[in-house]
Image (cartoon, rainbow, N blue to C red):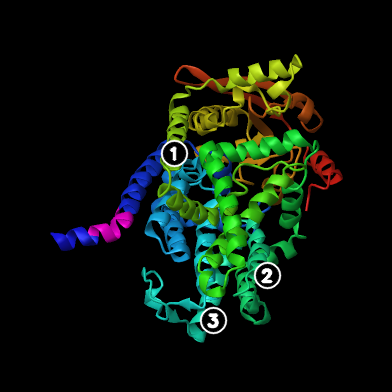
Amino acid sequence: MSSFIKKYNKYKYEIYLTAVSVFALIVHIHLASTLNLGNDEAHYYAWSLKPSLGYLDDAPFVGWVICLADALFGKSQLSVRLGSIVFSFFDGFLIYYLTYILFKSRRAAFFSFLFYLSAVIFGMVLSVMMLPDAPLLFFILLFFIFFYKAVEKNGETKWTDLFHFRNEKQNLSAPFVSSYWFISGIFLGLAFLSKYTAALIPPAVLLYLLLSKRNRHYLKTFYPYATLAAALLVFSPVIYWNAVHNFISFRFQLSHGFSHPTPGLPLLLAGWLGQVLVITPFIYIFLIGAFIYAIIKVVYLFYLPSEKQNLLEPLLFSLSLSLPILLFFVFNGYSHRILVHWPDIGYLAAFPIMGYAAEALIAGKKITRYYVYFAIFFGFFLSYVLYNQIYYNSIPVGKIIRYIDKEKRLKKGGAFSVIPHIPGKPSTADITNDLFGWKHAAKYVGIVYKGYKSVDAPLFILTHHYAIADELVYYGGYRPDGNIYNISGFLNQYDLWQNLNKINGENALFIMDDKYMINPVKTYAPYFKSIKKIGRLDIYLKFKPVRTYYLYLMKDFNAKKMIKHLKAKSRMY
């Protein structure tokens, strides 16, 4: 019995980690199975129907994962999201292990895991929705682990010891060091294949090596450059695809992620407050405190004798690979719109610092101990609120936005003056509504399409926004450049797929919803002989309206005129 208790006390945090992870996995599977695909997820599903070395919007790995999952398990919402569920499940273990090898504390490692899981963006969003961030976070964490192993002078010598929890220090042999560098390069390359924001990692690594007195000498060796070369080799298919396509994806990402028509403080606050909300307020406050604590600790340790600097490298490593990336997105938010999930890679190396700081605070005064517990509890509570909002729509988001907009129009000042305007209609501002209604809409569109096709054939589906086209591709079974086309006012992936000459002279069934409203008669009148509104579909959730669809019949498409118009806007490549 005593031996059992000893083993339990030794591995209790691994037991807690596994139990919580399995419970979270069950919740994620439930969400993934019951929610309609979000607009971005449907877009990446459309990618999977046309496997390629590159796409306009981002790196291709997410499309490959969906393609593989659907081939193995068949088409379903769960199979589309399976990659995200699996990656995020292991992300928790990797964050735990990364924290352990940095600070040699199971308790700190467990707290870093709890901070990760209780942050809404990681525990509820990126762990369910199949976005490029899912493989990105997984491969970045593996890169961090192998890279830290590579630069450390003291480590394990056996390959099988990589995932063993050991405290004894041994000399790291040169061949094994080389393999760590090479493997870290492979994972960095896979991160590049997942999402272009992984390009922020090499500068952060360079900063760490420049600041580290102990590991700065590696810059005079071939190791870090061989690591980068290995990463670029893995990423080379995307580079080749871009070269063939006039580097369209790289150029699109630069203009997409680094431009906004109205820069200023409200834009910066909108981006920053978005981060506070998705990380959750009390965890974000703790994160700031942990950064301050770590910086002070690093400065203090920097001037101590080398034998007393055991914590310097772990803290410096975590700070260098997190704080600069997060600050980049904060300050870039002054002139550019930053979506809430873009800075996610900056938090991965921050969680170990938070776990280390939490362990120190818990051993201190009661008030600091209670704050740590409360911050984590409040994060999980907000995850529950989001879960409740998704299924029961209990928070009147539209009414709140209408009130804020009214106060801003009355110019009452105060807090309302710095709250940015939320684009679109208040009735469509609740983004959780995007996860409902598409299945019914596609069924309705299918009935109408079949009926009109029997009379007005040949007939194709037309949308003005790629998100609507993508959702219909998944739920309606339509195929890009087959029987569904997207002709919009901005460049998107459909411009690379579709050949408008194929549908010259055909009739179109046009679909739009009240989130992406346009005047279809005004927009498409020059390219069709006639346009007529033929239908409307209202979607309700718990007796509350969440979306309205509008259908138009457009006759005799003039492809030559449309192509001429698109070429004038540099839209055809």
Location of residue 83 in the rendering, given as x and y in whole percent from the top left corner:
46, 53
Is 198 situated left or right of 531 in this image?
left
Q: Is 290 in the magenta?
A: no
Q: State the separation of the CA atoms marked 1 and 2.
A: 38 Å
Residue 465 visible to an observer of this rendering: no
The amino acid marked with disc number 3 is Ser
What span is colored magenta in the figure?
8-15
Please name the residue shown 46% across and 44% down the image: 123
Depth order, front residue of 363/522:
363
Location of residue 180 in the rendering, given as x and y in whole percent from the top left corner:
51, 76
Please tell me whether mark 2 or mark 3 is closer to you in this view.
Answer: 2
Q: State the separation of the CA atoms marked 1 and 3.
A: 47 Å
Disc 1 marks which residue? Answer: 367
Please tell me whether mark 1 or mark 3 is closer to you in this view.
Answer: 1
Disc 2 marks which residue? Answer: 210
User: Mark number for residue 430?
Assistant: none
The amino acid marked with disc number 2 is Leu
Q: State the separation of the CA atoms marked 2 and 3.
A: 20 Å
Please name the residue shown 47% across and 55% down the image: 356
Q: In the rendered image of this protein, does residue 32 appear above or below residue 133?
A: above
Farthest bottom residue? 174
Q: In the rendered image of this protein, does residue 213 appear above or below residue 479?
A: below
Contact between labelled residues 2 and 1, with CB atoms less than 8 Å apart: no
Label 2 sits on a secondary structure element that is helix
Disc 3 marks which residue? Answer: 178
Q: In the rendered image of this protein, does residue 129 appear above or below residue 134?
A: above
Farthest top residue? 410
Please tell me whether mark 1 or mark 2 is closer to you in this view.
Answer: 1
Contact between labelled residues 3 and 2, with CB atoms less than 8 Å apart: no
